[in-house]
Image (tube, rainbow, N blue to C red):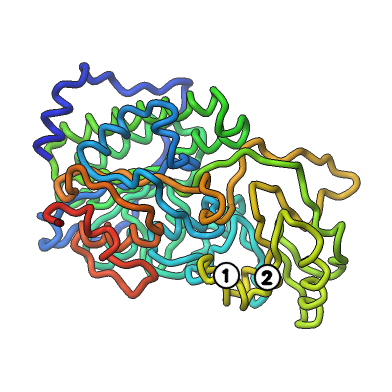
Amino acid sequence: MRRLLLALLLLPALPPFAHGAPHAKAPVVEVPNADNRAEQLAKHYVVLVSIDGFRYDYAKLYGATHLDAIAKDGATASDGMLPAYPSVTFPNHYTLVTGLFPEHHGIVAMSFYDPQRKERYAFNDAKAVTDGSWYRGVPLWSLAEKQGMRAACFFWPGSEAEIAGARPSYYLKYDDKVPDEERVEQVVEWLKLAPAKRPHLVTLYFAEVDHAGHEYGPDAPETRAAVRHVDSVIGTLRAHLAKLHLPIDLVVVSDHGMATEQGGWIDLDQYADFTGVETAGALMYPDSEAAAAKLYAKLRIVSNKFKVYRRDRMPAELDYTGEPRIGDPVVVATGPYSIRVHGPADSARDHPPNKGVHGYDPHIVPEMRAIFYAEGPDIRKGATLKPFENVNVYPFLAEILGLDAPAIDGSAAVLEPALAGAH
């Protein structure tokens, strides 16, 4: 931390927080959780930042100098971090804070159907995302609160729901319009609270890079500008954290990368009859084994742009099986192709796929790889990590915070080389 403070003293004078267009300050929901227990007060702090859609090589491609400084002062996965399959936002954000693959935590896609509940979950359905019964596992903020350590979330999928019997002490309802600078300002305000009220775990989320990547593609100047913007905000955050003189570990990740879409929509209903079959995007939920077998037989031979599997015979490296919410059969794209069961109804207006896309197997589409950067008193300077699965972030953070983690898919041993004192 002393090295970080010295480096930041050499930065230009810190600018005041900028707010851009007028926007009412986002309201924080404060939960009446207990104060930090006495044994938690001396423990270190973690600020976990997610930059949605920030591909593993964006920092090098577009000159993200502040992220590069974190890599030099701390640890990084220079060739990226492997997202869970499917490499989309909600499943991976929830994997990062539970250490579980989607097949185990239950958030298997952005939108899906649960054949047992006979209900749908969708990322843009406020009733669903705030209903804790959809989520399994113990999110890091719930783990902290249950062990007498306060937590705060400035946005994170799952943070608006009560999960595992707990909520973070401070959280906000998602509002994409909140300026990034205001998000940083609130994090700093939380860390200035009296020790009894101060959260030791804080999550922070930025979406602009993902928006730009989708709309313009990963190679566009607009995406470069979004990368430069969020990198600047990270620089502001680093400088303000240094001025607090607290033992803070800053960890910056992303949920997935981004690839250039190829070829337009592939509509599966051109190859098979889905009459009476529940669907969600490319997921399908036939109501019998016979119907599932029929769909599999029809779809498995029609295109080299996707492969089709029965759910119980999915490739082991995807860790995507067993859970009925996944559907059966399962279609896995072989490249950056946009697949859905149905296009819009005849009366509805269709639209082309986004220029930038994600959701693919990171083992065969390397553009899906995410980022991992960390610096602070618990991080070994100059640590360079080989690509690792993002389920291992959770036990790494739990160890830094001194929390007892439950049984999960990740392992604390994977990121041990990034910890100070490691050899």
210 up-or-down from 122: above or below: above
- Residue occupying image coordinates x 66% and y 35%: 355
- Residue occupying image coordinates x 75% and y 38%: 352
Tag 2: Cα neighbours inside 10 Å, few (<14), some, or many (≥20)? some
27 up-or-down from 122: above or below: above
| Residue 269 location (% of width, % of height) | 84, 59
User: Residue 167, can we see it?
Assistant: yes
Tag 1: Cα neighbours inside 10 Å, few (<14), some, or many (≥20)? few
Residue 8 sits in quarter? top left
Residue that label 2 marks: 309
Which one is in front, 126 or 327?
A: 327
321 up-or-down from 131: above or below: below
Residue that label 1 marks: 315
| Residue 254 location (% of width, % of height) | 43, 45
Outermost residue to the right: 346
- Residue occupying image coordinates x 20% and y 21%: 11
Which one is in front, 112 or 271?
A: 271
